[in-house]
């Protein structure tokens, strides 16, 4: 699940968002309340009536964010059981964590002592082993690498994968294995607690679902719990203790219940003593402010600039000639502006919710191996982009580039449903361009040049062919406007040793220099593609982008009446002038030369129309 839900309806308070609309996990009425109580911690409350009345709480923890840490219930050090029983609230207070949830199954032994059922460790000290039916566990290393463990033999501590144990939370059954739901028979509706990981294991999820509470929430089965977690971004998950044990608390700063437990006699709001709990350390959210960072020299990370994590910045402005590195999964939604120097994205989610503008003279650098996500990226003329960017729903949603920006060190991929727009009448240079036929590259009146080896000619052809029917492909509003005013224009493309060139051109302008002249006539004749059945490019005479050079293209060329009329982009000819047919093809007009070629092939004479 993305940190800020889709379709935000309204801002309730300063930093709380309510998402109203169709359910993300199930069909039917659903509402979501999304908040970020701590740095790197996102809380989503989900209320739904399908498949029944349910109240769920999903806590997402970004394991890469500074200040995130974990705690489990400590050992009691005695022979009677492994831990001292306590409520989740007591655990939260004792351990001074910001988030606390009940852990794995446990059983009362004597006095205040409890036996933990399953593998458990605290800060590297193992105090409980796997047991029958308690054969899964979550381990979080000292440097916050999270792993779901499986017992090798059913008992003992042998595990797969065999990673060192640090903070290890005893679990019960597997709910999700690599995105697949594990089914169980004879399931009843209960309050539930679970823990899971994202596919890349960089985010840890805690989920509680209330139950046994008519009018509030009725509970779910384990497969239903797995399905709800999967549909909210979880890839691997295990079940924890549920029923009356299901409890979730925050300390912000005072302890408060987040869910409605039924810990004592199924009475709503009562809390049960348990032998296993799990806690999360996190830094408090900073007050919102406009942030300006001036890097006068060298390279500086955001943490070194005093901002380990941006959550509620009112804006972010980068100035100065130095390099600022954003290396956290920042979640602020305000605008980012790069006014000087270089802003480097070292993490995909660094600007995932921030519309970003790079002004002229400034640069945006995407680090190797990073696939940035952001709602929009505007590159002004004179700005620079380096690194790889994918334009589409999973990357940069909208790429807006002014001609004159320098993308010669950038690789741009326009994916399906992605939109990249080039503005202005100058030249845009790209190091690499790939486009899905269902993506859209709008070049306007600009000239787009791609370096040699930085494109796939077949892919470019497919983008032209796909653009007419799907709404995607390579398009130009400038060409459409010219055609509407009676001036024949189309998007021309040329491939040679200099790479790929794209621009709006008139039929016959094979070299895209803004002129239709004898050089173009020579190119058409030398290409020999007339009525050859294709394939043909613009430079071969395919002026209507149908894949071949034929009489229809000749007709477009002749009707344009632009041969030797100068730069047609300056307004075109004032009057049409008849061009005499030459005795030899290269002796006179390009239109007449092509007409001669057509006559030889189809036994029909075609000459330019007189004014």
Image (cartoon, rainbow, N blue to C red):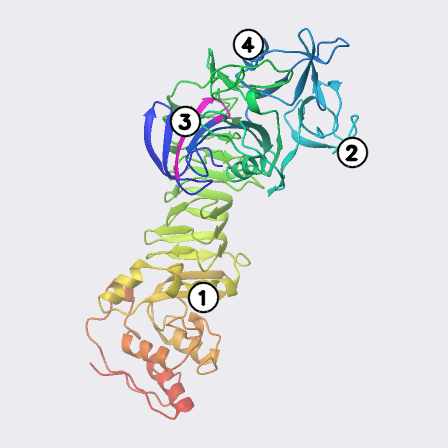
> Looking at the image, is mark 3 or mark 4 nearer the viewer?
3
Mark 1 or mark 3: which comes first in sequence?
3
Magenta residues, start to end = 29-42
Determine whether label 2 and label 3 are within 8 Å by CB.
Answer: no
Residue drawn at (32%, 57%), measured in percent from left and top? 445
- Report the Cα–Cα distance between label 2 and label 3: 43 Å
Q: Position of residue 596 (x, y in %)?
A: 37, 87
Query: Which numbered tag is attached to residue 494?
Result: 1
- Report the Cα–Cα distance between label 1 and label 2: 62 Å
- Report the Cα–Cα distance between label 1 and label 3: 68 Å
Query: Which numbered tag is attached to residue 215?
Result: 3
Q: Position of residue 509 (x, y in %)?
A: 37, 70
Residue drawn at (46%, 12%), measured in percent from left and top? 253
Q: Circle 2 — which element?
A: loop
> Looking at the image, is mark 1 or mark 3 nearer the viewer?
3
Question: Does 83 appear above or below 512?
Answer: above
Quarter of the image where one finds residue 115:
top right
Residue for badge 2: 152
Determine whether label 1 and label 2 are within 8 Å by CB.
Answer: no
């Amino acid at each position: 699940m993305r940190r800020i839900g889709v379709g935000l309806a309204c801002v309730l308070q300063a930093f709380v968002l309510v998402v109203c609309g169709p359910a993300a996990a199930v069909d039917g009425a659903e509402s979501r309340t999304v908040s970020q109580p701590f740095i790197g911690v996102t809380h989503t409350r989900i209320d739904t009536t399908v498949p029944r009345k349910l109240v769920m709480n999903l806590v997402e923890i970004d394991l890469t964010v500074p200040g995130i840490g974990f705690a489990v219930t400590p050992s009691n050090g005695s022979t009677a059981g492994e831990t001292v029983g306590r409520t989740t609230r007591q655990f939260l207070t004792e351990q001074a964590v910001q988030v606390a949830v009940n852990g794995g199954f446990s059983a009362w032994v004597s006095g205040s002592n409890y036996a933990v059922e399953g593998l458990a460790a605290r800060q590297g000290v193992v105090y409980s082993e796997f047991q029958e039916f308690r054969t899964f566990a979550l381990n979080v290393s000292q440097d916050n690498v999270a792993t779901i463990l499986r017992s090798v033999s059913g008992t003992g501590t042998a595990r797969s994968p065999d990673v060192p144990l640090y903070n290890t939370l005893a679990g019960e059954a597997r709910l999700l294995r690599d995105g697949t739901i594990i089914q169980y028979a004879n399931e009843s509706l209960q309050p539930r607690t679970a823990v899971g990981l994202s596919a890349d294991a960089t985010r840890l999820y805690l989920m509680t679902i209330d139950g046994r509470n008519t009018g509030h929430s009725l509970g779910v089965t384990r497969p239903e719990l797995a399905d709800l977690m999967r549909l909210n971004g979880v890839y691997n998950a295990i079940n924890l203790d549920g029923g009356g044990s299901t409890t979730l608390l925050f300390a912000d700063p005072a302890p408060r219940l987040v869910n409605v437990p039924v810990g004592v006699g199924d009475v709503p709001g009562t809390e049960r003593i348990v032998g296993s709990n799990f806690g999360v350390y996190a830094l408090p959210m900073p007050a919102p402010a406009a942030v300006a960072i001036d890097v006068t020299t060298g390279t500086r990370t955001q943490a070194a600039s005093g901002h380990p994590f941006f959550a509620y910045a009112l804006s972010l402005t980068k100035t100065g000639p130095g390099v600022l590195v954003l290396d956290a999964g920042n979640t602020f939604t305000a605008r980012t502006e790069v006014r000087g120097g270089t802003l480097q994205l070292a993490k995909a989610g660094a600007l995932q919710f921030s519309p970003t503008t790079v002004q002229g003279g400034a640069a945006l650098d995407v680090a190797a191996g990073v696939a940035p996500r952001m709602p929009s990226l505007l590159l002004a003329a004179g700005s620079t982009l380096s690194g790889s960017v994918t334009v589409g729903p999973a990357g940069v949603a909208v790429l807006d580039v002014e001609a004159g920006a320098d993308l010669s060190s950038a690789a741009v991929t326009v994916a399906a449903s992605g939109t990249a727009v080039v503005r202005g009448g100058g030249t845009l240079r790209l190091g690499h361009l790939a486009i899905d036929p269902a993506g859209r590259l709008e070049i306007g009146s600009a000239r787009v040049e791609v370096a040699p080896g930085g494109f796939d000619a077949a892919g470019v052809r497919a983008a032209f062919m796909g653009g007419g029917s799907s709404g995607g492909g390579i398009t130009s509003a400038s060409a459409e406007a010219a055609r509407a005013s009676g001036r024949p224009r189309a998007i021309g493309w040329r491939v040679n040793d200099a790479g790929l060139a794209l621009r709006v051109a008139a039929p016959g302008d094979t070299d895209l220099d803004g002129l239709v002249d004898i050089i173009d006539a020579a190119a058409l004749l030398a290409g020999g593609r007339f009525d050859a059945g294709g394939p043909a490019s613009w430079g071969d005479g395919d002026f209507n982008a149908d894949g071949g050079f034929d009489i229809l293209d000749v007709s477009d060329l002749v009707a344009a009446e632009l041969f030797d009329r100068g730069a047609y982009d300056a307004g075109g000819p004032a009057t049409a002038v008849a061009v005499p047919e030459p005795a030899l093809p290269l002796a006179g007009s390009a239109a007449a030369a092509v007409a001669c070629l057509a006559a030889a092939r189809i036994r029909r004479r075609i000459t330019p129309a007189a004014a």
